[in-house]
Image (tube, rainbow, N blue to C red):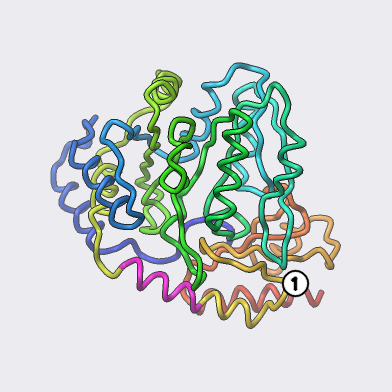
Amino acid sequence: MWVADMDFAAPPFILDALKRRIDHPILGYTDRPASLNEAFQGWLDYHFGWEIHDSWQVWLPGVVPALNLACQILEAGCEIIIPTPVYHPFLALAKNASLKEVRVPMRQVDGHWTMDFDTLQASVTPRSRMMLICNPQNPTGRCYNEAELHELASFVINNNLILVSDEIHCNIILGTNAQHHPISALVPELLERTISLYSASKVYNIPGVSSAVAVIGDASLRARFINARKGLVPGIGPLGLIAAECAFHDRSNWIPELTQYLRGNLEYLREQLGNRLAPLEGTYLAWINVADQQLENTEAHFAHHGLGISPGVQFGEASHIRLNFGCPRSTLEEGLRRFKLALQE
């Protein structure tokens, strides 16, 4: 229950389109169709009321390559600021790009994980150039509210930073009062300094035919980003293009029905785990406190009981584990049975 895709079949409308494409026997290099740009623009407008220009889109084979490319636009030795805990590939970005990583621990307010802006401000130096976040937040499940995002925007602007916002879980909102806000839509002043990252891979469960798109409104920043990819990151394969376009054209009940099922799983988790479970508003990833167990090797301990989890140390917070509940209820019930056995030992 560690890997971050779901145990549900991809939607039939995507599978059917892939089958039709397979009937064409050549799977060669493929130009990205203009219709993909149009589909994504319509999707952003439909879900979030954000109208973007066609030229703002830069397509890539995944969000993680996009994160790394964003860091490549900086000079060696510059600093990137990362609130932790965070999706673990964020914690490899600085080394990959010969940068300095500044981790700033998030704080808990009434159990909710949130950015600590006092500590963030204290972490800024003359070498600080970029801040990277995920929203909804992985692994804590936070979906930042408008007030938090406005405070973040002020911090980024006042310190002359570039913001990279991974918004891959933006359609998986489980909190009844939560809402996803694309930060560049909420605060237009950020558009000239923000790289926003999207993909259909999570909500439609198609990471194996993945594609992603960076929305970069500023022409100069976009040019630096595109230049950094030369010779390093390939285009998207034909199946990835087909799957993405089908997903972004979707106006079916797929997302509402998936959300309803995941909310049921989340309620079951709350019943079983109580205060161990962090309040969760987005994603299908549970952030569970096991600090009282004082485990030397968290991953090995749970694996010994037949349960694969992501140890919190990967995300910069050793007191927790991450568990994927994007699965049939029977799988979740068995996983929690094994989790409880591991705690009893």
Q: Secondary structure at mark 1?
A: helix
In this rendering, the answer to whether 266 lies above or below 162 is below
Residue 49 position, x and y percent, is 32, 53
Residue shown at 68% from the left, 77% from the top: 273
Over which residues does the magenta segment extend? 254-264
Residue shown at 13% from the left, 43% from the top: 24
Q: In this figure, what is the number of numbered marks?
A: 1
In this rendering, the answer to whether 148 lies above or below 335 is above
State whether the magenta stretch is mostly helix, strand or loop. helix
Judge from the rendering whether residue 112 lies leftward or rightward of residue 182; answer left or right: right
263 inside magenta stretch:
yes
In this rendering, the answer to whether 205 lies above or below 229 is below
333 inside magenta stretch:
no
Q: Quadrant of residue 119?
A: top right
Circle 1 residue:
342
Foreground residue among 262 and 335: 262
**Label 1 amino acid?**
Ala
Residue shown at 60% from the left, 47% from the top: 151
Residue shown at 59% from the left, 36% from the top: 156
- Classed neighbour count for the residue bearing mark 1: other residues with Cα under 10 Å, few (<14), some (14–19), many (≥20): some
Residue 106 position, x and y percent, is 71, 51
Residue 304 position, x and y percent, is 72, 65
Report the quarter where the N terminus lies.
Answer: bottom right
